Image (cartoon, grey):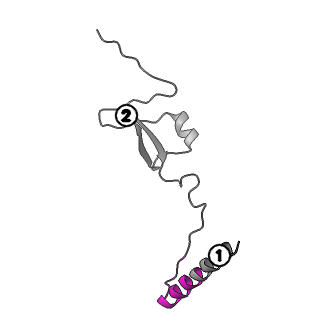
Amino acid sequence: MASHCVRSVGPVATIDDGRQITIPEKVLEALRIGPGDKVEFFHVAPEEFLFYVATRPLPGAGILPKRVRRPVTIDEMSHTFASMDRERRKARKGKDKK
């Protein structure tokens, strides 16, 4: 007869016949979620998933400012590359003198 080891370290939920799960009240309160909120599941290891609240931005999202890029003309690109090339040559010339 095989024995089953059940791992339980916190609140437990049961899946019903309709594949619905009721998240324990303690978990709902801790995550500050309720009816209508969506959760997203991430596969982290065989037989293990994490879920995050999908209706709220992830921590750290939006920290970096969005760069608004304007179209650049060919002349502007040529000027930029020529300036970079001049700077490289200056730096190289300085090293050669040492």
Residue 76: where, in percent of width, then height?
53, 88
* Residue at x-position 33% and y-position 32%: 16
Residue extending furthest toward the right? 98
- Helix, strand or loop at disc 2? loop
Residue 85: where, in percent of width, then height?
57, 81
> Are dots 1 and 2 in contact, CB under 8 Å?
no
Which image quadrant: the N terminus? top left
Q: Relative to 95, is 35 on the left or the right?
A: left
Cα–Cα span, label 1 and label 2? 54 Å
* Residue for badge 1: 91
Q: Amino acid at mark 1?
A: Ala
* Residue at x-position 58% and y-position 80%: 84
* Residue for badge 2: 46
Q: Amino acid at mark 2?
A: Pro
Q: Nearer the viewer, residue 63 or 72?
A: 72
- Helix, strand or loop at disc 1? helix
* Residue at x-position 30% and y-position 12%: 2
Sequence order check, earlier mark of 1 and 2? 2
